[in-house]
Image: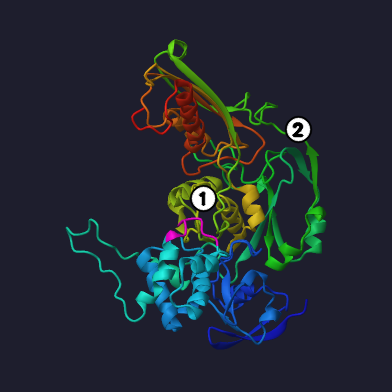
Amino acid sequence: MTAQAILLTVNGAAQAVTAPPATRLSTALRDHLGLTGTKVGCDAGDCGACTVLLDGAQACACLVPLAQAAGRAVATVEGLAATPMGAALQRAFLHHGAAQCGICSPGMLMAASALLAATPRPTEAEAMATLGGVLCRCTGYRKILDAVLDAHAFLGETPAPAVPAAGRAVGARMPRADGAAKVTGADLFGADAAPAEALWLRAVRSPTPRARFGFGDWAPVLARHPGLVRVLTAADVPGRNGFGIYPDIKDQPVFSTGELRYRGDTLCALVGDRATLEAIRLDELPIAFEVLEPVTLAGGAALHDRWPDNILTTGRVVSGDAEAALAASAHRAGIEIETGFVEHAYIEPEAGWAQRVGDRMEVFACTQAPYMDLEEVAGVLGIPHSDVRIIPSACGGGFGGKLDVSIQPMLAVAAWLLRRPVRAVLPRSESMASSTKRHPARITARAGCDAAGRLTGFAFEGAFDTGAYASWGPTVAGRVPVHCMGPYRVPAVAARARAILTNNPPSGAFRGFGVPQAAIAQEALWDRLADAAGLDRLDPAC
C-alpha cells in the first residue's frame, strides 16, 4: 500500500506521519514519532498495553489504522503530565507503588486519565470498569485501583519521598529509582530501542512437535528477496551450538541439527530488512520435513542420547519406612491428580538487539538473569566472558519465564557474523509457542494418620513433563520432594519426583518450581484424610 502523509495532533502538537493508511497507530507513534511510551504486548487488542486516548476516549492503538486517526487528537503517556490531573495520577502511581514492571503502566495511566477527566473522584466500580481493558500480570490491580481512587489528593505539588537518614530506613517509604521512568513512558523495554541501522531477525520455527528436516537450495529465496541478507543455520554458530541453565547441560540448540523436538524449536533464522522478512512466506523456504511420532509422558523413543530412558533427573526424599507407617495407620487416604501447562503470559514479548564492538559482543534484551545470558552468549560465540556485555532492558514481566535465554544467542550470532546491529521482537504467538511453561504433572500421593489425627506416613510419586529440553527440570525435580508434604511434620516419608523429557515445549522456571503442583495434591489429600478420620478439615486444633 502506498505511503501517504497523514496529519494528526499528538499530545497537543500537529504531526505529519508518512506511512500507508493501514499502518497501526501504535506503529506510527513508536516507529515514526519515537513515542515508545505506548507499549505493544499483543498487536491484537487483548492486553491494552498500547491504550491511548483518541479524541479523549480510550483506544487500543494497535487496532486503530493510522488513517482513522487523521485530523484527530491523540494523547499518549508522554503528554500526560501536561494536565494537572494527569500529573497527579502519575504521582499517585508512584506513591502507591502501582507501577511494578511498568509494561502496562502507560496503558493503565491513559485509561484512568480518561475516567478522571470526567469523574475526578470515581467509585471503585467505575475505576474497575475503566481499567478492565488493560491487563496487568504483576500487581493484582489493588495498588493500581488505590492510585486511581486517590489521584485527586495529589493535585498540586506533592513532594517525592526522601531517602531516609541512616538508622531510620526500617519501615520508611523509599523513592523508587526507576519509578518516574515507568509512569512517564521513558522506561526502555526490549522493543523500545535499537540502532537505526539495525537489521531484523526472524526465527523459523518447527510447525510440528517432532520431525526430521533438511534444507534445500537457499539461492532462489535469496534471489527473490534482495532484502534478505543472510540465512543462519547450525553451521554458522561460531562456538557451542547449545545453551541451558546448568553448566553440564547445554542441550537446547541455537539452531536445530536434523531433528526438531517441539513445536517452536528453531530451524534457522532469516536476517534482513523488516519489510522483506515480513513478506517471506514459510512455504517458499527450502525445508523438507519428515514428521515423527511425538514422545509423551506415556513413553516413546529417546529424545537425547544422554538420557536413553527420557528421565532427565530424579529427586528423592526418604525418611523412615513410609509403607510400614501407612500400613499401621488408623486412617488412610489417597489421591491422583494431573495438572497442565501454564503460560507465564508476561505482557512484554521477548525483544532486544545485539551489536559487535570490535571483538566484543553487546546484547540489549529483556531478561531476568543478565549474568546467565552472558555465559550463554559467550559459549555460543566461543569467546571469553569478559568479551560479552549484557545490557538488561526493563523487563516487562517474567515470573521465571525470562530466566532462560530466548533470542539472545540468535541475535549474538547474527551480529557477530554480519558485523552489524541486529534486532528482533517476537510476535505474541511466537513468544507463547517457543517459551518455557510451568511443568505439567501427574501426581499420586497417599497419607496416613493415627486415631488422634496425627500424621504418620506419606508417600508421593510425581511425573513432571519437562518438555524437549532440560531448562529448569532438575531444580523442579529436586525441590518437589522436599516441599510435597507442605509445612507439616510427617515421621515417615517416601517422595520421588521425576523430570521426564517429551516433545512438548520446554518446561522451566515458574513461581514455585513445581511446588504449586504438589501443593494441589497435598492439600486435597489432607482434606480426604481428615474426612476419613472424621475430623473437621478446618479445625486448627486438628
Q: Based on the picture, tell me whether residue 139 belongs to the magenta stretch.
A: yes
Asked where in the image residue 212 lies, by quadrant, the reply is top right
User: Is 247 in the magenta?
Assistant: no
Tell me which amino acid carries mark 1. Answer: Lys
Residue drawn at x 59%, y 30% as measured from the top left: 500
Viewer-proximal residue, 43 or 265?
43
Residue under circle 1?
402
Marks 2 and 1, how far apart in space?
30 Å
Residue at (46%, 40%) from the top-left corner? 512
Circle number at residue 293: 2
Query: Where residue 197 appears, x then y in whole percent?
Result: 60, 70
Q: Judge the density around disc 1: few (<14), some (14-19), many (≥20) Cα neighbours within 10 Å.
A: many
- Placement of 425 over or under 149, stated as above or below: above
SS state under label 2: loop
Q: Looking at the picture, tell me which residue is in the foreground, 149 or 313.
A: 149
Q: Is residue 285 left or right of residue 194?
A: right
Magenta stretch bounds = 135-142
**Image quadrant assignment for residue 170:** bottom left
Most common secondary structure along the magenta stretch: loop
Report if residue 297 is visible in the image. yes
Q: Quadrant of the N terminus?
A: bottom right
Instruction: Indicate the secondary structure of the residue bearing disc 1.
Output: loop
Q: Is residue 397 toward the left or the right of residue 435 in the image?
A: left
> In this figure, what is the number of numbered marks?
2
Task: Name the side, left or right, on which 133 lies relative to 403.
Answer: right
Residue 375 in the image: state x and y as whole percent.
47, 46
Choose between 456 and 66: the one closer to the eye.
456
Give the image location of residue 409, x and y in percent. Answer: 57, 50
